[in-house]
Image (spheres, rainbow, N blue to C red):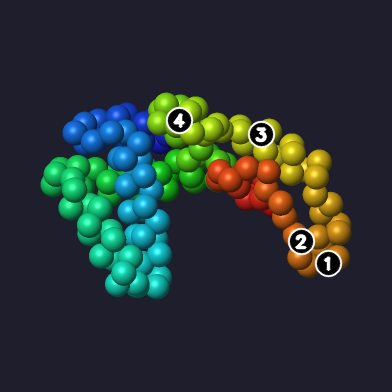
Amino acid sequence: MQYPKEFEYEFKHLAPYHHRYKVWDDFITCFAISLNNSVARDTYLEEKYLTIINQYERDDRFKFAKLAGLLVMAFEESGYCDLLGELYMKMEISSKNLGQFFTPYSVSKVCALLSMDKKKIERQRYITVHEPASGSGGMVVWW
């Protein structure tokens, strides 16, 4: 099954009464809060989650949960690449006016391989990183 395509389909039909960027931001925020609160419950974050999710109709709240499941399956299917960045750009949620651009994972991987010395990292046991962008951190995540 192609979970990213199913995710994209479901997302496009989620909450047509909100702007796509808002829906994306709300989904990612709620998903992150859910992950956090599953291991370290935070009442402030739970309130934030409820404030966000209550802006959506009942059926759309259930779709948020479905999207979270599809996203987990897509990560497992894709080998944990920068799937969120790919989906974000593919669904045309980004804003070129805000300078939001996606570097394909393969390019990030090559840049990381060219700029990092794995033997030095193993020897020092730490590194200092200067990520050239403020997006998903694809070059750092690869390592």
Label total for image: 4
CB under 8 Å between callouts 2 and 1? yes
Which of the labelled discs sits on residue 95, or is there none?
Answer: 4
- Find the distance from the CA under tag 2 to the CA under tag 4: 32 Å
N-terminal-most mark, 2 or 4: 4
Residue positioned 68% across, 43% down in the render: 132
Residue type marked 4 = Ser
N-terminal-most mark, 4 or 1: 4
Please tell me whether mark 3 sits on a helix, a strand or a loop.
helix
Residue positioned 75% across, 59% down in the render: 128
Residue type marked 1 = Gln
Name the residue carrying label 1. Answer: 124
Please tell me whether mark 4 sits on a helix, a strand or a loop.
loop
Position above or below: 143 against 124: above
143 sits to left or right of 85: right
CB under 8 Å between callouts 4 and 1? no
Label 4 environment density (alpha carbons within 10 Å; few <14, some 14–19, many ≥20): few
Please tell me whether mark 2 sits on a helix, a strand or a loop.
loop
Label 3 environment density (alpha carbons within 10 Å; few <14, some 14–19, many ≥20): some
Residue type marked 3 = Ser
Name the residue carrying label 3. Answer: 106
Name the residue carrying label 2. Answer: 127
Question: Residue farthest to the front?
Answer: 97
CB under 8 Å between callouts 1 and 3? no
N-terminal-most mark, 3 or 4: 4
Residue type marked 2 = Ile
Residue positioned 71% across, 51% down in the render: 130
129 sits to left or right of 14: right
Viewer can see residue 135: yes
- Nearer the observer: mark 3 or 4; the answer is 4
Position above or below: 69 against 119: above
